[in-house]
Image (cartoon, grey):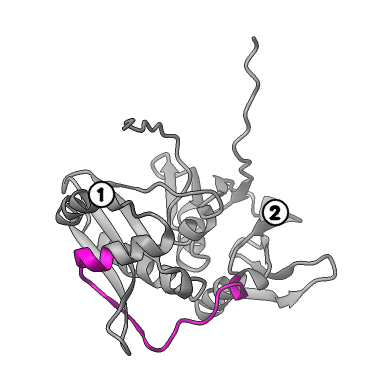
């Protein structure tokens, strides 16, 4: 059988007169975290953020730069990105507004004169409620009883695994717990395992059912991600497994799709 081609993404290649300056602008102002350079001094470069990629190619003729080129980038939580771009003084030529074709959009003009339209749906963010005032995120691992109660709530607990859970709580190098300050109850948690050399594994990101869709999971992941960024070994990999429908949730913390293989040991 002939194997079928698989297309992963498309990357525009745009002419610029200043390679380094263009990369810095797309990183420092527009927020794209990843980059690469080619050549010394650089004559080609690229930036990326999740599934969006742009390449830059150096030209000496200024007339070839910024002439009629537009980019349309789809975004989740567009209101938050819009706030960031305003805070970083990006040149916003069209304010965030709902468009007749069903998207909320705004347009930025970059330092080369290219126009970038960021498009999304502010309703995406409103699906989650506001973060409760009585919830705090504490940097600690849950106790065994707390861990079991959270797992019961999300349907992950089996009565025969209690002893195994003791071992699971001894292994993580870091943990965060969401606590209800009015009752002292642990209503969510997230853990990090590591070999302390080259790999970190995020697991057991859980929020009790009655507390879900209130930004608590995002607060747990935000605190956990900040710890990894501050304490992780440089150039280490950080991995996790997630179910269908949660990909975009983890993307906001810098995670992206990657090829991998998995095997389950049968009981």
Horizontal relation, residue 171 to residue 40: left or right: left
Does 172 sit above or below residue 123? above
Q: Which residue is mark 2?
A: 63
How far across and down, in percent of the image, does residue 158 sit? Answer: 33, 51
The residue located at (38%, 33%) in the rendering is 262
> Looking at the image, which is closer to me, 9 or 259?
259
- Mark 2 or 1, nearer chain start: 2
> Looking at the image, which is closer to me, 260 or 69?
260
Would you say the residues marked 2 and 1 are in contact, meaning their CB atoms lie under 8 Å apart? no
Quarter location, residue 156: bottom left
Horizontal relation, residue 219 to residue 15: left or right: left
Q: Which residue is mark 1?
A: 161
How far across and down, in percent of the image, does residue 182 sit? Answer: 32, 90
Give the CA separation, mark 2 to mark 1.
68 Å
How far across and down, in percent of the image, does residue 208 sit? Answer: 41, 69
Horizontal relation, residue 228 to residue 99: left or right: left
> Looking at the image, which is closer to me, 198 or 54?
198
State the extent of the magenta-drawn residues as a range. 125-147
Tell me if residue 234 can be seen.
no
């Amino acid at each position: 059988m002939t194997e079928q081609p698989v297309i992963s993404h498309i990357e525009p290649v745009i002419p610029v007169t200043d390679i380094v300056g263009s990369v810095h602008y797309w990183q420092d102002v527009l927020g794209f975290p990843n980059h690469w350079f080619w050549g010394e001094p650089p004559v080609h470069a690229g930036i990326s953020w999740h599934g969006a990629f742009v390449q830059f190619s150096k030209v000496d003729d200024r007339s070839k730069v910024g002439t009629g080129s537009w980019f349309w980038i789809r975004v989740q939580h567009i209101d938050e990105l819009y706030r960031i771009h305003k805070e970083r003084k990006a040149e916003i030529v069209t304010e965030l507004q709902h468009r007749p074709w069903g998207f909320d959009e705004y347009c930025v003009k970059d330092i080369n004169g290219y126009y970038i339209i960021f498009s999304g749906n502010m309703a995406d963010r409103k699906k989650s409620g506001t973060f409760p005032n009585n919830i705090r995120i504490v940097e600690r691992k849950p106790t065994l009883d707390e861990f079991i109660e959270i797992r019961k709530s999300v349907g992950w607990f089996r009565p025969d695994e209690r002893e195994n859970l003791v071992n699971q709580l001894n292994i993580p190098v870091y943990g965060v717990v969401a606590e209800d300050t009015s009752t002292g109850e642990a209503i969510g948690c997230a853990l990090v395992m590591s070999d302390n050399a080259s790999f970190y594994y995020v697991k057991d990101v859980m929020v009790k059912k009655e507390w879900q869709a209130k930004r608590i999971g995002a607060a747990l992941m935000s605190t956990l991600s900040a710890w990894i960024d501050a304490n992780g070994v440089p150039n280490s990999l950080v991995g996790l497994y997630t179910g269908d429908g949660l990909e975009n949730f983890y993307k906001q913390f810098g995670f992206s799709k990657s090829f991998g293989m998995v095997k389950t040991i049968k009981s």
